[in-house]
Amino acid sequence: MTPEIDDYFARLKAEHGRECLARVEEMLEPRRRSELRHPLQRSAKWVLPGISQQPWHDPYAYPELLPLVTALEVGHADIKREQTQAWSRARERFSDYEHYLVRQRNWQALYLYRDGALVDESEATAPTAFRVLRQHAVETDLICPLLESHFSTLLPGAAIKPHCDLWNFSINLHLAIDIPDGAAIRVAGETRQWEEGKCLLFDYSFEHEAWNQGDRTRTCLLADLWHPETTLPERAALTMLMQEIQRVMAA
């Protein structure tokens, strides 16, 4: 670790107790990394110990997340109408989705939150989703500032190959916006279909894939949230840790 990380961790321990970052520090021990993960998390870079090794989660089971889930589902009709208008009238606002592993032209994204902040120019394009995200994810600190929220649109015939994302301390929430027949997602070997207007929640450190074999686009609103089983000091430490790692690697 760098001196900056050491100093920040020390301040968090002084404020929250000497054991508040025990799981984060255990995650950083090289000899423990392979021991902490499920076989289907084998390609994830970071696995925080003590997080349930559970691929699929009930989006209604966590009081912390429930206001966001409820607001998204209540707002689905307006969110869908605004996204449909944006796709037909403001296609230039969408871009190839740049996953850390791949960039796909048949996987399009309209970002609402990115690089630690709301994408203000998206408010006029998708006002309902922007408002819900701001009120129930950003202002409540549920969203993971290391990641993003975006409309994810798979063109007909598109497929996202099986992969693990970087870590298990954030979790992926999907609101199903427009779902054709033939679109599905598989996480840790279990396949599910999106139900339009409803949310799915899964741990994307487990191997997952998605496809659209339908005859029109498949669109979901995705939000990368802190895993409900992480603590506030852990979230602060993990944010600083990953940002410092990125800074050092880019230097």
Image (tube, rainbow, N blue to C red):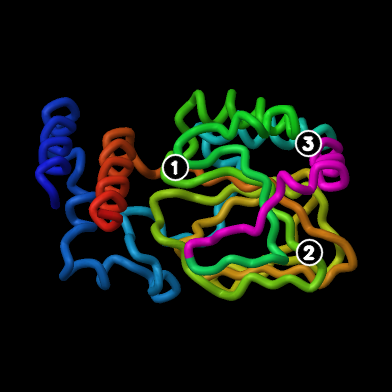
Main secondary structure type of the part rendered in magenta: helix
Q: Mark 1 points at which residue?
A: 226
Does 106 appear above or below 129?
Answer: below
- Amino acid at the residue labelled 3: Ile
Residue sitting at 24 percent across and 67 percent down? Answer: 33
| Distance CA(mark 1)–CA(mark 2) | 29 Å
SS of the residue under disc 3: helix
- Find residue 138 and name its label: none
Residue type beneath disc 1: Trp
Numbered tag placed on residue 79 in the rendering: 3
**Position of 122 relative to 32 (above/below):** above
Figure quadrant of the C terminus = bottom left
The structure residue drawn at horizontal position 74% and vertical position 49%, both measured from the top left corner, is 176
User: Which residue is denoted by mark 2 in the rendering?
Assistant: 155
Badge 2 amino acid: Leu
Task: Give percent across and percent down for residue 166.
Answer: 41, 61
